[in-house]
Image (cartoon, rainbow, N blue to C red):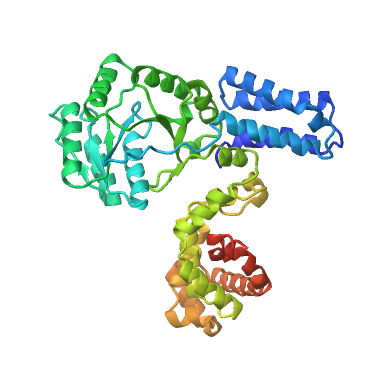
Amino acid sequence: MIFEGLSDRLQGALSKLKSKGKLTDKDVKDAMREVKLALLEADVNFKVVKDFIKTVQERCVGQEVMESLTPAQHVVKIVNEELTSLMGDVQSKIVISPKPPTVIMMVGLQGAGKTTTSGKLGGYFKKQGKKPLLVACDIYRPAAIKQLQVVGEKLDIPVFNMGDKESPINIAKAGLSHAIKNNNDLVIIDTAGRLHIDETLMDELKSIKSEVRPHEILLVVDSMTGQDAVNVAESFNEALGVDGVVLTKLDGDTRGGAALSIRAVTQKPIKFIGMGEKLDDLEPFHPDRMASRILGMGDILSLIEKAQENIDLEKAKELEQKIKKQDLDFEDFLEQMEQIQNMGPLDKILGMMPGMGNIKDQLGDVDMNGKEINRTKAIVQSMTIEERRNPGILNASRKKRIARGSGTSVQDVNRLIKQFNEMKKMMKMFTGSQKSMKKRGGFAGLPFFK
């Protein structure tokens, strides 16, 4: 889960207020002291923390809060609003040029994940109906061009390169001309990085900027570097003028200081966040949704979007009819498991649900990395089509064969059959609630979460 340590500390500090009827100034001050420590431990910029606590505290001791019937909820609401404001209030989108192609220049230090992020961004916009072109301008890092080509191939996005002997400025210009000739309406330029900021790097980037005149300059920053990420952002912005930030490796960052500091310090919006190593692990950044996730309020909108993106609504409707008729079989079960897996790791999905912030604590030893799902899939895939469609014919000899084929035991097969039958009973109970779920789009296709 993102910001795990920070999230736990903040929720802990605010939950203490909920046990109190009316709040005193001391209650608020004590809670704010814990919030302050949580933010500092998360490596949030000291001045940012100081200003944040001052603003929240001033709002919390107001008459409206103190005389409210639910003062603790008011405090949580204020913290949520101020966290959102800290990260930028509203989503900042990429500026798309009315006259194609839109040119996006990717900059950043080595190791931040710039090349992979260039590909991910291309993949994101390809899903939006764009025709992207990746341009390989990093001629210095060994295998940088090859890496971009591999990423482009996986995403079925063309990559323009001229090898490592031509200057990056000429490659960028030629790449733009190539895009115009081939009707690519989006050009993503992957520039070179350095281990640290130097004059040579900045001069090269300035030259590329003046030649291709990008509509957006996106700075790719490793969120795990904490305050260093903020310093890097300041330096790049002063020298080059960036339009937005992409924070990578947010899935591995238990502190989160960069995300909470970078907007406040640089006044540049976070536009995307990298949430994993897969090429679709890139999300648009929504400050309000992120604040809700940090405070354990969930992120239902993002979950619905993920469901709609990964779940076939026609098949979901068919499944709904099968559930109503009590006609569910292992073929449907397998199909749904695969669609749920496509949405990403289970802990990320459940972490978007309200009250499920500390998901690992709540679920204890439940497998969160997908091994159990893969084992279950192996068992179902070892069944014949007839067995999947008619689970009632699964006798002892068939179960032995399935266990051998899936590398599991007969007990595992029996356990799955038992769980499947129990789930069918549960489905019968939930069919009445399916009508209300239709209004939530993709959730109609998520019966196995119920």
Residue 255 seen in the current view? yes
Residue 334 seen in the current view? no
Q: Residue at x 33, y 22 (%)?
A: 195
Report the label total: 0
Q: Residue at x 52, y 40 (%)?
A: 286
Q: Position of residue 434 (x, y in %)?
A: 62, 68
Q: Position of residue 141 (x, y in %)?
A: 24, 29
On the picture, is 441 further left or further right than 202?
right
Q: Residue at x 52, y 77 (%)?
A: 329
Q: Residue at x 58, y 27 (%)?
A: 42
Q: Position of residue 127 (x, y in %)?
A: 36, 52
Vertical arrangement, residue 184 with respect to residue 79, above or below: below
Vertical arrangement, residue 450 with respect to residue 403, above or below: above
The quadrant of the picture occupied by the C terminus is: bottom right
Q: Quadrant of residue 112?
A: top left
The quadrant of the picture occupied by the N terminus is: top right
Q: Quadrant of residue 27?
A: top right
Determine the residue located farthest toward the right in the rendered image.
21
Q: Quadrant of residue 45?
A: top right
Determine the residue located farthest toward the top in the rendered image.
199
Vertical arrangement, residue 434 with respect to residue 123, above or below: below
Q: Nearer the viewer, residue 78 or 197?
A: 78
Vertical arrangement, residue 391 with respect to residue 259, above or below: below
Q: Position of residue 156 (x, y in %)?
A: 27, 52
